[in-house]
Image (cartoon, rainbow, N blue to C red):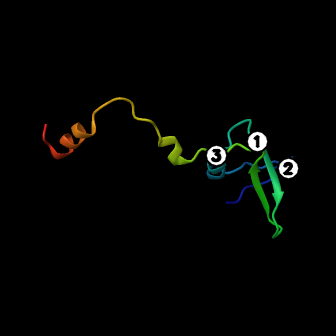
């Protein structure tokens, strides 16, 4: 992904990169030089980006018993 540097030396971090790193307005980022000389952008606040699976993870409350769920699955109700 390419982006353009403004006259003030600013760049816009592409949305897919922001989403991947969990960068939102107000987030701090750090630029680090990797061993191969490339520059890596990382979150400076050490917060882990929430995975797409974690967003879907939940906890089931009280509800149907296993037997009731199996009966529904089998069409026995």
Label 3 neighbour load within 10 Å: few <14, some 14-19, many 20+: some
Between disc 1 and disc 2, whose residue precedes? Answer: 2
Label 2 neighbour load within 10 Å: few <14, some 14-19, many 20+: few
Q: CA distance from mark 3 to mark 2?
A: 26 Å
Please name the residue shown 78% across and 45% down the image: 44
Label 3 or label 2, whichever lies nearer to me, is 3
Task: Look at mark 1 in the image and give the residue it sits on.
Answer: 45
- Say above or below: 30 vs 26: below
Q: CA distance from mark 3 to mark 1?
A: 11 Å
Q: Secondary structure at mark 2?
A: loop
Q: How many marks?
A: 3
Q: Secondary structure at mark 3?
A: loop
The dot on residue 49 is 3
Q: Residue furthest left?
A: 76
Task: Look at mark 2 in the image and give the residue it sits on.
Answer: 9
Task: Return the x and y of residue 8 as percentages of the image width and height.
Answer: 86, 46
The dot on residue 35 is none
Task: Return the x and y of residue 38 as percentages of the image width and height.
Answer: 80, 65
Please name the residue shown 57% across and 47% down the image: 51
Observer-nearest of 9 and 40: 40
Task: Return the x and y of residue 1 as percentages of the image width and height.
Answer: 67, 60
50 to the left or right of 46:
left
Observer-nearest of 1 and 18: 18
Q: Secondary structure at mark 1?
A: loop
57 to the left or right of 70:
right
Q: CA distance from mark 1 to mark 2?
A: 22 Å
Observer-nearest of 12 and 28: 28
Task: Assess whether mark 2 and mark 3 are in contact (beta carbons under 8 angstroms).
Answer: no
Image quadrant assignment for residue 46: top right
């Amino acid at each position: 992904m390419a982006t353009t540097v403004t006259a003030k030396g600013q760049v816009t971090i592409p949305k897919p990169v922001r989403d991947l790193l969990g960068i939102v307005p107000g987030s701090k980022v750090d630029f680090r030089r990797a061993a191969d000389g490339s520059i890596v952008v990382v979150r400076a606040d050490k917060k882990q980006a929430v995975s797409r699976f974690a967003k879907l993870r939940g906890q089931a409350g009280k509800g149907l018993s296993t037997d009731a769920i199996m009966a529904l699955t089998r069409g026995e109700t």
